[in-house]
Image (cartoon, rainbow, N blue to C red):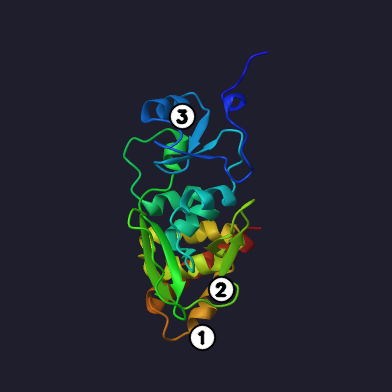
Amino acid sequence: MSLTFEDLLPPQHPGSALFRRGRYVDAITWDCLVREGHLVPLTDEIARLRSVPATSLIRSMAIARGRPAGAAICDASALWVHDPASGARLTGQIPLGTRVAHRRLIHRGPVRMLYTRATPRPRAPADAAIVLRRTSVADGDVDLFQVPGGPPIPVTSLTRTALDLASRHPAREIVPALQALAALGVDLEAVEHRLHVTPRWIGRERALRTLGSLLDGNSRLDRSAALSA
């Protein structure tokens, strides 16, 4: 009977199916395991076993290292957790000429996290690549990803992620991401309505312009499709 790489691994509990470069394997072995398909990188330092499904939970675990209590993954990092194809384009520059699929889907750059105005600023470890910002958080803005045998990981919901992205990024960067979130079920009109009733929201005018333009374009496409039907 032939053995696979995973047969040689020590027993792991369900929440530890991630490997860190330099901790479990050295750089040369890491590159070999990735090249042979045993490991699938999620960041430049963290990979999942090939047999482990590429779920939102696994992605949240990959970037939660050093997350201080009271902080939630947000913005482009949350988008990557929910939808790595669009999120990877916002978390960091994909090197030109990158053709290998997993290299186009990894999370690059610091992890974006938020904390509420009602709590003191959380303290992230000095060696953790985390960018924190303080903001208001409403009910339903944060989803909890349950880690087997560990504490849950808070990540902004699809709708709150759409709100943050529209408020903090230029339209030319963010429209494909908003379209991807809409395809996952986000009601962009509801996001627009929340902005209308929250006059002091930072980035409100930018977000309204972006969403208005996108929704107006979608409406024109819908009308055109109805006429041609």
**Against 193, is 53 above or below?**
above
Q: Nearer the viewer, residue 189 or 16?
A: 16
Task: Answer with mark 2 or mark 3, whichever residue precedes in sequence.
Answer: 3
Compare marks 2 and 1 and give the one earlier in the sequence: 2
Within-10-Å neighbours for mark 2: few <14, some 14–19, many 20+: few
User: Which secondary structure lies at badge 1?
Assistant: loop
Local SS, label 3? helix
Looking at the image, is mark 3 or mark 1 nearer the viewer?
3
Residue behind mark 3: 34
Spatial CA span between label 3 and label 1:
49 Å
Residue 40 horizontal/vertical position (percent): 50, 35
Tell me which amino acid carries mark 2. Glu
Residue 165: x %, y % from top left: 43, 65
User: Dot 1, how many residues are within 10 Å of its Cα: few (below 14), some (14-19), or many (20+)?
Assistant: few
Quadrant holding the N terminus: top right
Q: Residues within 10 Å of mark 3 (few under 14, many from 20)?
A: some
Q: Which mark is residue 189?
A: 2
Quarter the C terminus occupies: bottom right
Mark with earlier residue (3, 1): 3
175 displayed left or right of 150? left
Left or right placement of residue 182 versus residue 64 in this view: right
Which residue is under mark 1? 197
- Image quarter of residue 181: bottom right
Which residue is pictured at 60% across the width and 72% down the height?
A: 140
- Real-space CA distance between mark 2 and mark 3, rounded to the nearest whole angstrom: 42 Å
Kindly identify the amino acid type of the residue bearing the numbered disc 3: Val
